[in-house]
Image: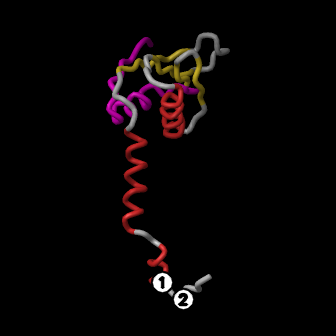
Amino acid sequence: MKKFSSLSDLKSLINPSGISSISSVAINKKNKLMKQSLEAHYSIKGRAGKPVTLIKGFKGTKNEMKDLAKILKNKCGVGGSIKDGEIIIQGQYRDKIMSILIDMGHSVKRIGG
């Protein structure tokens, strides 16, 4: 194993073309979801009075729905799940989720309350 004596020696480990391909893969994965018309609902029904935000109308594979739910949960810093073709985000984050989805290129309707 080669020993490096300075930071400039570390340049030999980096493949400049590899860096751009990694970032382009990340960008493609982020934008691979089709632009869709979604509905953002706020509900406390059947959840012991706990507020949740529901995203309905997503058309795609289960994995695509999981990816979208993961993005929303991470950006809101809360938990959530997928059930019956709906993305359930814990808490009242409808406005924040709507702005995230609009930034991703989806059209979102605010439904109810």
Give me the C-alpha separation between circle 2 and circle 1.
7 Å
Q: Which residues are magenta?
A: 89-113
Locate residue 51: give its quadrant.
top right
Image quarter where the C terminus lies is top left
Would residue 111 be counted in the magenta stretch? yes
Would you call the spot at circle 1 few (<14 residues within 10 Å), some (14-19), or many (20 or more)?
A: few
Extreme residue in the right direction: 48
At horizontal 59% and vertical 10% (from top left) the residue drawn is 45
Identify the residue under disc 2: 5
Residue 93 vs 25, above or below: the answer is above
**How many numbered callouts?**
2
User: 34 and 74: which one is in front?
Assistant: 34
Residue 19 percent location from the top left of the image: 41, 62
Type of the residue with mark 1: Asp
At horizontal 55% and vertical 27% (from top left) the residue drawn is 89
Residue 79 percent location from the top left of the image: 60, 32
Q: Is residue 69 left or right of residue 96?
A: right
Would you call the spot at circle 2 few (<14 residues within 10 Å), some (14-19), or many (20 or more)?
A: few
Residue 67 vs 11, above or below: the answer is above
Would residue 108 be counted in the magenta stretch? yes
